[in-house]
Image (cartoon, helix red, strand yellow):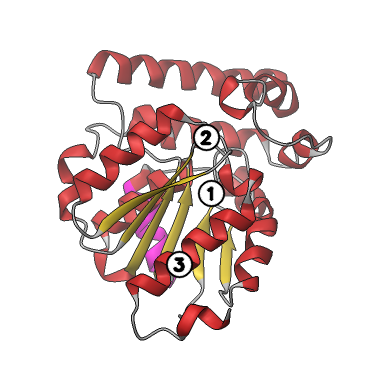
Amino acid sequence: MTDPLLLLHGFSQTAASFDHLRRALRAHGLGSDALDLPGHGAGSGPAHLVSGDLWLGAEALVAAGHRGVWFGYSMGARLALHVALARPEAVDGLVLLGGTAGIEDPVERAARRAADAASADRIERDGLESFLHEWLAQPLFATLPADPDRIARRATNHAAGVASSLRRWGTGTMDPPLWGRLAEIAAPTLVLAGSLDTKFTDLGRRLAAGIGPNARIATVADAGHAAHLERPGVVARLVADWLDDRDPTAEANNGR
């Protein structure tokens, strides 16, 4: 594979959250570009709020010249799904880690939108760092390795930008959800989930089954939701092996 993977981070992260994974991918001969998504990192600040929904975000990425194999984590996986459906010509492959096609029950979906809007209000009122202490204390992130600087790094984001991403790109904004459209995705797809993240392992199986024969699912052993942070070497190996299988013309084992 010659084109780099396009890495789309999760909520409250930045492109730098992929640093360990990018090093692990390089060990397999794979290049990657990590993007700061709107509302985050270099894309944050008053001039770069998330101003449209996930469909508009997908169109903007492709209009900026991005194409290739898209790797999305959590929020980034939701965005990658929208890219695959809106602009399939820009997608050579799809890797979805900790992703979902949305909340099917309309009452639950509305409740999630309301909860995210309330969190966004609190971020703007109380500051991002205060919110992050509670956000990262969720059981979803209980398996993350100890890192005293994690909150400090995420808190470099602009509060207004992160709040806007919750309002515009939260799971509840996928209305209608995308489960009924997954079979439209023709690109080869690898669905990943941490083996300890049972909720997203189940969702991952549904994603792979919905996309069809071009999709496979793999679990990352002894990892939770943020498997790329917990076990970057394993994630990189799974991606490299999938790319080898996907492209029989690739150099054997990507130089390994």
Sequence-first tag of 2 and 3: 2
- Residue flagged by tag 2: what amino acid is it? Ser
Label 1 to label 3: alpha-carbon separation: 31 Å
On the image, the x and y values in percent for residue 193 come to 45, 42
- Residue flagged by tag 3: what amino acid is it? Asp
Circle 2 residues within 10 Å: few <14, some 14–19, many ≥20: many
- Marking on residue 25: none
Image quarter where the N terminus lies is bottom left
Rendered position, 130 above or below 27 = above
Rendered position, 127 above or below 102 = above
Question: Dots 1 and 2: beta carbons under 8 Å?
Answer: yes
Q: Which of 45 and 40 is in front in this view?
A: 40
| Residue pointed to by mark 2 | 164
Q: Residue 181, located in which quarter of the rendered image?
A: top left
- Marking on residue 38: 1
| Residue pointed to by mark 3 | 241
Queried whether the magenta region covers residue 153, the answer comes back as no
Residue in the image at 61% along x and 38% along y:
12
Residue in the image at 32% along x and 69% along y:
90
* Magenta stretch in the rendered image: 55-65
Q: Nearer the viewer, mark 1 or mark 3?
A: 3
Rendered position, 73 above or below 19 = above
